[in-house]
Image (cartoon, grey):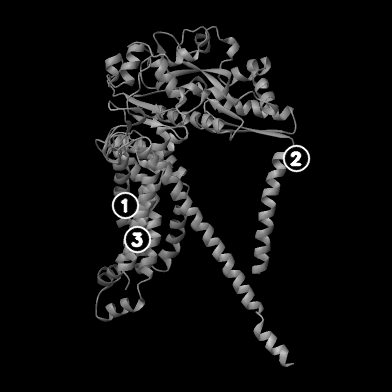
Amino acid sequence: MHDQIKESLLKKSRATRSERRGKLISLFCTAIIILVVVSIFYFVASKGLATFFSNKVNVWDFLSKTVWNPGSTDSHGNPQAGAFPMIIGSFAVTLLSAIIATPFAIATAIFMTEISPTKGYKILQPVTELLVGIPSVVYGFIGLSVVVPFVRHTFGGTGFGILAGTFVLFVMILPTVTSMSVDALRAVPRYYREASLALGATRWQTIYKVVLRSATPGLATAVIFGMSRAFGEALAVQMVIGNAALLPHNLVSPASTLTSVLTMGMGNTVMGSVSNNALWSLALLLLLMSLIFNLIINRIAKKGEL
Amino acid sequence: MKKKIVLLLGVLLLIVPLTACNLTSNQGRSITAVGSSALQPLVEAVAEEYTHGHKGNFINVQGGGTGTGLSQIQEGAVDIGNSDLYAEQKKGIAANKLRDHKVAVVGITPVINKSLKVDNLSTKQLIAIFTGQVTNWNQVGGPNQPIVVINRAQGSGTRVTFERWGLKGRGALQAQEQDSTGMVRQIVASTPGAISYMAFAYVDDSIKTIAVDQVKPTNKNVEQGKWQIWAYEHMYTRGTPTGLTKDFISYMLSDDVQKRVVGKLGYIPISNMQVHRTLQDELKVPTK
């Protein structure tokens, strides 16, 4: 009798065992994910850095030169790997589309949370979700058959260029930014609004001075999240930007982005050659940029805590 | 509940490799052919026919581009590497380890937007257009309309062939690039003043071909050596092919397939060619 109680107290119970098992499984899964991330970084970095170490491309030349033809060499015998036009292209479409999308997204979010939280929300919520779910190739196809001719007729040029890319990306990041803005606005405590209204503020004053103000970090995160999506988008942009590794003269001249050059060149280069390594360097650049976007988001989230 | 999920995961982990083995080992032979998208339709059609007639064999055909095909066959990751180019023409490929099987010839033609009233260009004019010396169609006898050059991606087999034989070894200017013939066709069809180039097999009513030096881009002119812009389509193997790879390649080269299928899909059978080219012809750059 006595021993039985003692035994059951000393022995591990079922609950303890299942807890340990659960811990082990989740630890195992986490370890695998970390391993995958680390090996991706290692792989892309080792390939991407080979351009600079084994093919002797100057890092500064890579970032600032404008001739992209890594298969051939310039007068000094260095591969012509100047990624500046692509860097400019990527940043241009990203910033422009974010600038256009932000007011639309925030206005929609305000409508969904403050002005018409029941009816408007019920209609707009599935619409934004649907927009998120449309595959990028569909956006690209619409861009190619509708946006490009529209830009050609309205603004001249061939229609392919940064402007067409901006329009397509605007539609693509709009739902992402909108739904994240909605979350940010909903996270504003109810008593903020109540206090503001009790002080005699109108609804617009409440939205403008209280809700938007206290949701600013969340809204900034939403915009940067959208930008990081725009920066990494490959297929849709590739279909409408024209893919010319040239510095764009204006918004309707053909340009290219880091992603579009990457997807174009992949199948036509041989592993280990200079052209292939140069593409990996572009991939490394993209990886570093998304890391920077993530850091910014973290920074904002920390600073903006209420 | 948790236990069940764990069990399920465990079972899945066990089953996946088992089924994978089954597919490859127990049910006959299987090979993979990867590479050139220009050659892909032909290989796919012939592979389908072959596996239909020879039960228990699987031939997996994938695109990916000439570069992919050559590097994959070099690494031994696949059984056949499809290429528009001689392996020697591609940097980073040890061609002496590979065996070349020429399976067809493909002609490449300049194409323009349908609304342009241009039917013929001299080689000189073609070079001037693709190197950027001429930027308006009225400089080459056409309407007053800016020229929009659309290139294939750098390193694409079609582009290399066009630059070698169409532009006599000169590189095309930096301009819009597309990574597939389908996209090129659609863009040329919808963009006024556009010019590009593509394999005969892809030409349709939405675009217009032009004659070069008064020679029309037809299979007959390619066979007789009058039309200069063409290339062999290669299937590369590592060393002498064996097993299904060998059977499939000899099926591809059989008179029946060459006469019946190759021509129907817009390619030219090797046996019809009255002119021949060597690797040296491809590498030699004519004096400018």
Of B277 and A75, nearer the camera is: A75
User: Relative to A181, is A134 above or below?
Assistant: above
Of A104 and A253, nearer the camera is: A253
Q: Earlier in the sequence, mark 1 or mark 3?
A: 1
Horizontal side of residue B231 vs A116, given as left or right:
right
Residue bearing mark 3: A297
User: Relative to A222, is B159 above or below?
Assistant: above
Determine whether the residue tagged by mark 3 lies in a helix, strand or loop: helix
Determine whether the residue tagged by mark 2 lies in a helix, strand or loop: helix
Which of label 1 and label 2 is nearer to you? 2
Of A39 and A205, nearer the camera is: A39
Residue bearing mark 2: B26
Q: Which mark is residue A98?
A: 1
- The quarter in which the N terminus of chain A is drawn is bottom right
Determine whether the residue tagged by mark 1 lies in a helix, strand or loop: helix
Q: Which mark is residue A188?
A: none
Which of label 2 and label 3 is nearer to you? 2
Name the residue furthest bottom.
A2
Label 1 to label 2: alpha-carbon separation: 55 Å
- Identify the residue shown where x is 29% and y is 39%: A84
Mark 3 is surrounded, within 10 Å at the Cα level, by few (under 14), some (14 to 19) or many (20 or more) other residues, namely many
Amino acid on which the number 2 mark rests in the picture: Asn
**Which chain hosts label 3?**
A
Q: Quadrant of residue B4?
A: bottom right
